[in-house]
Image: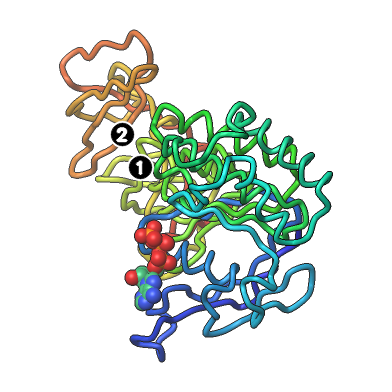
Amino acid sequence: MARIELVDLAHSYGGNAADPDCWALKPISMTWRQGGAYALLGPSGCGKTTLLNLISGIVTPSRGKILFDGKDITLLSTQKRNIAQVFQFPVIYDTMTVGQNLAFPLQNRGVPKAEIDARVAEIARLLDLTPYLNRKATRLTADAKQKISLGRGLVRSDVAAVLFDEPLTVIDPELKWQLRSKLKALHRELDLTMIYVTHDQTEALTFADTVVVMHDGRVVQSGTPAELFDKPAHTFVGYFIGSPGMNIVPAEVAGRQARISGHRIALNRSYDRLPPGAKVEIGVRPEFVTVEPPTPELLTANIERIDDLGRVQFARVRIGDVKFNARVPPGFSIPDRQAGLRFDPSRVHVYADSRLVEGAA
Ligand code: ATP
């Protein structure tokens, strides 16, 4: 396994190559630690696969370098990079048994038989494939075949990194949650550097220690799941992570106060130096705005509907032209579709041109 450094790495597939703003991957520099579990998360077309393919060597970057443990591997072939890959669809040999499939990447590298047997047994145990070891892969379900693919990706202990590109796409929804937690446990046991591409926030947040959120070819934030939830560095992260996402609304902000549609909201910190001319917004997660019976002290809002998500309810409310999602406490009943909104000031963030602004104490 390896520490992976991306140094001013960027890629253009052609098109308007003179303008880096149009590139599929805008310049990024970051370091991923040896043995870490990383997820690349973002919507379709944001550049996740491009970044993964640059790391694996399938694509050569237009600019910048990639280092594995300090060694520049930018121009090395995929094979020489010593990485394992798991794709969306199973890549296995149907005519071989499950055990032969798992052993194949090790046989290819001349690993001694005793070592192969031990490693295959360990990986089969971790993936619950032991009962199938002597079965031909061809007779198995798509789920089981993808488990074999995962096993083939994980079986070598000498790889610099294991790269996963949306590996649970073909997995039955019922099994998906089991495999998600299993992959996390596998990471703990196997001590490999793993990079996992997905557009599914639940997959990313369950699997990774560090989630790298991408938007429009840029990394907009890299952090733990808690950091992404508590303090989104970019409005896109606030909106993309969470269900429902963060409320992001235009506001006038001065000192310790924000105004939306003429109503005042207290802030925990002071914002006196916002960049002139910037688009100013506040962001607050629905979990930290509570619907209560209206009082003069609270901001009054009209309730448009209540969404019952099972264990929790959120109200869709309107203040003037501005729409919000807010948490409905258990047992709350709506008197006449009017409610008071209570904001937790420590959870209200200020954004200028979509970027988080740190206020002063
Ligand atoms: P998805 O989840 O849909 O695969 P992604 O986040 O992985 O999306 P990429 O596949 O990296 O995104 O694509 C990023 C951008 O680069 C997109 O605008 C895409 O159209 C473009 N792109 C990707 N591959 C190529 C290619 N081989 N040639 C030209 N443009 C490409």
Q: Is residue 38 left or right of residue 58?
A: right
Image disc number at residue 22: none
Residue that lies at the very extreme toward the bottom in this rendered image: 18
Q: From this viewpoint, is residue 354 visible? A: yes
**x and y percent of residue 275 in the render?**
46, 68
- Name the quadrant containing residue 296: top left
Within 8 Å of ligand 1, the CB of disc 2?
no
Q: Residue at x 40, y 88 (%)?
A: 17
Residue 361 seen from this side: no
Compared to residue 16, the image places residue 41 above or below, namely above
Relative side of 223 to 322, left or right: right
Of labels 1 and 2, earlier in sequence is 1
Tell me: is circle 1 under 8 Å from ligand 1.
Answer: no
Q: x, y (%) of residue 339?
A: 25, 22
Q: Which residue is mark 2?
A: 325
Q: Where 93 sits versus 64, above or below?
A: above
Circles 1, 2 touching at the beta carbon (< 8 Å): yes
Query: Who's the residue at 52% across and 68% down the image?
Result: 53
Q: Which mark is residue 247?
A: 1
**Element at badge 1?**
strand
In this view, the residue in front, 286 or 144, is 144
Locate the N terminus and report the quarter of the image it occupies: bottom right
Which class describes the residues within 10 Å of circle 2: few (<14), some (14-19), or many (20+)?
Answer: many
Q: Is residue 65 above or below residue 211?
A: below
Q: Is residue 331 left or right of residue 222?
A: left
Residue type, numbered disc 2: Asn
Q: Nearer the viewer, residue 173 or 240?
A: 173
Q: Residue at x 34, y 8 (%)?
A: 331
Q: How is the image coloured?
A: rainbow
Quadrant hosting residue 172: top left
Q: Amino acid at mark 1?
A: Asn
